[in-house]
Amino acid sequence: MSRKLNLALLVCDTPKPEVLEKYGDYPKMFTNVFSRANTNELKNKVEITWQYFDVVHKQEYPDLRDLADNHTFDGIVISGSASSAYMDEPWILKLIQFVHKLRAEPYRSQVKLIGVCFGHQIIARACGGSCEKNPNGWEFGLVPVYLTPMGKHYLRTDKTFTRVNQVHQDHVKSLPPGFHSLATTAPHTPIHSLLSDDNQCITVQGHPEFVREVVRILLTIRRDAGIVPKDYANEQLKKLEDELANDDDDEWMISKFIDFILGELPIVPKDDIDLSTGKTFGNNILIGND
């Protein structure tokens, strides 16, 4: 019997025209990377269907009653955005409120949540963490992101680090209650990936949906506009050129998202949670190079 997943993508932005022309919008990029991961990384293939919701301009969302009654989606992915998750724009506040609702039953045990970059920060904010502009500046390019002990255990890997394309100057400053840190680039960006202890939410700060050329285009645009320091931009562009083509872990990361939605990754051990407060403790929640 073939496995099936019905996914929703909450689209939080439209890429730059230079990216849009060559690589398409977020729906196309996410559909493509999930398809590549399904083909190249998974032993048992999954039939994946998508629906896309413009949460910015049209403020479209999955119908919650339909979700509760008919389990219309197995997972909901929140995309990246050039906007900042700490702003109080009406569409951002509405998105945070939607995540709040999904964190309660009956949705909590029915649908998985995945946050990517801006989506990572939105989930953190909605669940009690905080985000801000990173005082350490931009993190751009193919950056090694180091897995915490919990990250290696949960993702079932011996990898010390993963390489996923980064395009961000904001970050999650504080860990939400009941969440674990899975990855870090401390001291630059201590919290790079989150997992909720109820196994509903997983997030990454990077962009596994971006191929390298997308990052080259965005970095060049921002360098030429004076947004990203020229020396730093040129250094990262050189690294993108020099890295081997098969060093990217985008498909590997997406395959872990698929496993997560299917419920095939391990549940967080209960002895890592203080049952009286619901807060996590121990090595699993250390942020930085633990």
Image: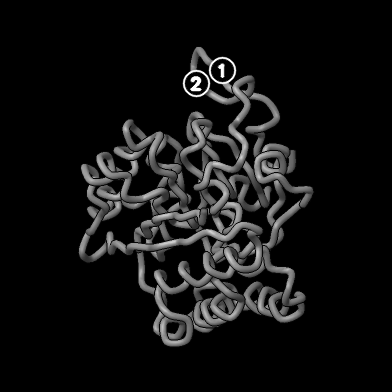
The one nearer the camera, 265 or 204, is 265
Res. 278 mark? 2
Q: Hey, which quadrant is residue 207 in on the image?
A: bottom right
Residue corresponding to mark 1: 274
In the image, residue 36 lies at what x, y percent? 58, 70
Q: Residue at x 32, y 38 (%)?
A: 100
Res. 200 mark? none
Q: Hey, which quadrant is residue 98 in on the image?
A: top left
Q: Hey, which quadrant is residue 106 in on the image?
A: top left
**108 is higher (above) or lower (below) than 251:** above
Whether the residues at callouts 1 and 2 have beta carbons within 8 Å, the answer is yes
Q: Is residue 41 left or right of residue 258?
A: right
Q: Residue at x 39, y 43 (%)?
A: 111
- Rendered-image quadrant of the C terminus: top right
Q: Is residue 33 left or right of residue 66?
A: right
Q: Amino acid at mark 1?
A: Asp
In the image, residue 27 lies at what x, y percent? 40, 69
Q: Is residue 163 left or right of residue 132?
A: right
Q: Residue at x 50, y 54 (%)?
A: 3
Q: Residue at x 49, y 31 (%)?
A: 198
Q: CA distance from mark 1 to mark 2?
A: 5 Å
**Colouring:** one colour
Q: Residues within 10 Å of mark 1 (few under 14, many from 20)?
A: few
Q: Amino acid at mark 2?
A: Gly
